[in-house]
Image (cartoon, grey):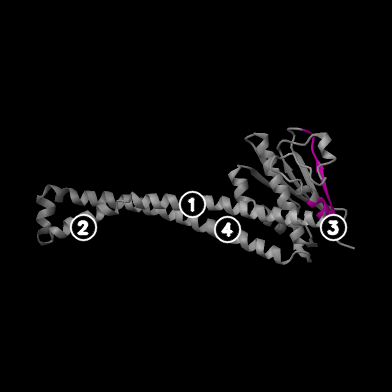
């Protein structure tokens, strides 16, 4: 059971990475399509025709531009085309810059996942805020697509802790994804996700707070049970795996909700020092 939960936790991270990459790829596809459409509709062909007309009258260019009806219209037409092409170039550069940033984001996500995969099971000193930011980064595109407002409330005096950062990442990624689903299911427009980090009593506490569907009182006692889920496509491993992982780290995973429609708070507690 422990191994199944561990594998489920790893799958959560991998799924989140793929989901996020998929969302970014959608943006990449949109930018590529916009640039392709702009190039198809480009007035560069009109410029080629205008140049051909000038070359055709190269021997008497002055007379053509002053005495011929088409020639008289040509300078104004060239100015209009030049203005259009300049605007077109600006729009394409903007989309290409967005395309480049999205591709960089995909590379960062994949590199981050690879770096975490290499250190699984190893405790090392980490900055909690950086670890949380990595978990958020893995969900950035999904949070943006689902229009969640993200708020950070970090204690400015957070110490480094020695921990298996891959295990912590698994727990945080799952909590953030669950918060996103809870907000989606609520149907509300002002979807909010808050990550609050505090420390005291030799513990650091990472609270993932949403204003989503909330949790009925009868579900609070069994929400960390193996196989328990309220989602149609859920498997009930994520929170169970998170609770086990937190215990293995010498901490705990806790939940609070004032009931249906009142949101939920999941708090991961980790010891500042392991005995």
Question: Residue 231 location, x and y as percent?
Answer: 71, 40
Q: Per the image, is 252 magenta?
A: yes
Q: Is residue 127 above or below residue 182?
A: below
Q: Residue at x 64, y 51 (%)?
A: 139
Write down the residue under mark 4.
Answer: 106
Q: Earlier in the sequence, mark 3 or mark 4?
A: 4
Sequence-wise, which precedes: disc 1 or disc 4? 1
Q: Which residues are magenta?
A: 241-259
| Disc assigned to residue 29 | 1
Q: For mark 3, what is the residue?
A: 248
Q: Residue at x 81, y 42 (%)?
A: 223
Q: Residue at x 70, y 63 (%)?
A: 117
Give yes or no for contact between labels 3 and 1 (Cβ–Cβ under 8 Å).
Answer: no
Residue 97, percent across and down?
47, 56
| Left or right, residue 203 beside residue 22 | right
Residue at the spot of label 2: 51
Q: How far apart in space, not on screen, are marks 2 and 4 (Cα)?
A: 43 Å
Tell me the CA gap for discs 1 and 4. 13 Å
Q: Secondary structure at mark 1?
A: helix
What is the C-alpha distance between the residues marked 3 and 4? 31 Å
Q: Nearer the viewer, mark 2 or mark 4?
A: 4
Taking the image as shown, residue 210 lies to the left or right of residue 78, namely: right
């Amino acid at each position: 059971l422990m191994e199944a939960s561990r594998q489920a936790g790893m799958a959560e991270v991998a799924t989140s990475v793929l989901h996020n990459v998929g969302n970014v790829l959608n943006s990449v596809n949109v930018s590529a399509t916009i640039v392709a459409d702009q190039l198809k509709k480009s007035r560069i062909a009109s410029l080629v025709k205008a140049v051909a007309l000038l070359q055709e009258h190269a021997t008497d260019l002055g007379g053509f531009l002053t005495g011929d009806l088409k020639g008289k219209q040509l300078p104004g037409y060239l100015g209009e085309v030049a203005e259009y092409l300049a605007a077109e170039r600006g729009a394409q550069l903007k989309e290409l810059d967005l395309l480049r940033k999205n591709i960089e984001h995909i590379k960062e996500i994949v590199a981050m996942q690879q770096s975490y995969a290499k250190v699984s099971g190893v405790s090392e000193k980490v900055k909690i805020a950086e670890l949380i930011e990595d978990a958020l980064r893995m969900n950035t595109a999904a949070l943006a697509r689902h229009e969640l407002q993200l708020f950070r409330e970090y204690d400015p005096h957070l110490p480094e802790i020695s921990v298996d950062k891959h295990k912590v990442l698994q727990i945080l990624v799952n909590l953030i994804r669950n918060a996103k689903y809870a907000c989606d299911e609520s149907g509300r427009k002002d979807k909010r996700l808050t990550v609050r980090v505090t420390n005291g009593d030799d513990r650091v506490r990472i609270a993932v707070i949403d204003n989503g569907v909330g949790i009925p009182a009868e579900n609070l006692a069994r929400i960390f049970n193996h196989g328990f889920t309220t989602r149609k496509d859920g498997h009930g491993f994520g929170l169970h795996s998170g609770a086990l992982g937190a215990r293995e780290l010498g901490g705990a995973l806790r939940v609070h909700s004032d009931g249906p429609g009142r949101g939920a708070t999941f708090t991961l507690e980790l010891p500042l020092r392991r005995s």
